[in-house]
Amino acid sequence: MTIRRMTAEDLEPLYMLLSDPEVMKSLEQPFTLKQTASFLKTQGLISIPRILAVDDKNQSFMGYVIYHDYDNESKEIGWVIKKEMWGQGIAGILTKQLVAMAQSEGKDVVIECVPEQMTTRAIAEKHGFQKAGESDGLDIYRRERAK
């Protein structure tokens, strides 16, 4: 897998991902094409992007990761991947990569998720995150940087 900056060409595959009701079940209502275009522009195509594309070994878009400052000490991470890729350990691999990126910057790492999202919680706990609280109805998991 390759994590890379988004491009304008990612609009169509991003729309296919974000318009899928099953993918969006624990996130938001499925996106329209207009909402997807706005999301790409404001989150992926900015000078310091908040999301990055993920390509498979064939360089095909398979989803995106969340990677941005959460606070002064932490990066927030997350992932949204195509449902046909679920259950293959991809979220765990991406978590490991994103934790390494954050730690190379000397940052703690945070994952936010809805309490019902048991898979995200399991991945967080497997990778050394501990529940640190709740905010706006989301569970906050934190992993402190290696000292």
Image: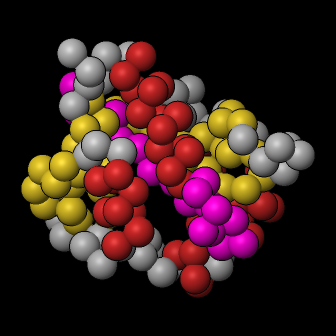
Please state if 79 lies on the left or on the right of 123 as rendered: right
Viewer-side residue, 27 vs 105: 105
| Left or right of 31, for residue 70 | left
Dividing the image into 4 quarters, which one contains the C terminus? Answer: top left
Q: Which residues are magenta?
A: 70-90
- Whether 104 is drawn above or below 127: the answer is above
Above or below: residue 10 compared with residue 44: below
**Residue 78 in picture, x, y percent from top left:** 45, 50
Q: Nearer the viewer, residue 36 or 91?
A: 91
Quarter location, residue 21: bottom right
The image quadrant of residue 30 is bottom right
Q: How is the image coloured?
A: secondary structure
Q: Nearer the viewer, residue 125 or 83?
A: 125
Q: Looking at the image, which residue is at 48% across and 38% down?
A: 96
- Viewer-proximal residue among 63 and 122: 122
- Identify the residue at image location x=64%, y=62%: 88
Name the residue at the front extreme. Answer: 126
Q: Residue at x 68, y 45 (%)?
A: 54
Asked if residue 52 shows in the view, the reply is: yes
Q: Is residue 72 magenta?
A: yes
- The verdict on residue 21 being magenta is no
Q: Split into 4 quadrants, where in the image is the N terminus?
A: top right
Measuring 19% from the left and 70% from the top, which residue is drawn there? 137
Considering only vertical position in the picture, is 85 above or below 44?
Answer: below
Q: Is residue 43 visible?
A: no
Q: Position of residue 140 (x, y in %)?
A: 21, 54
> Where residue 25 sits: x, y (%)?
48, 81
Going by the picture, which residue comes out furthest to the right? 58
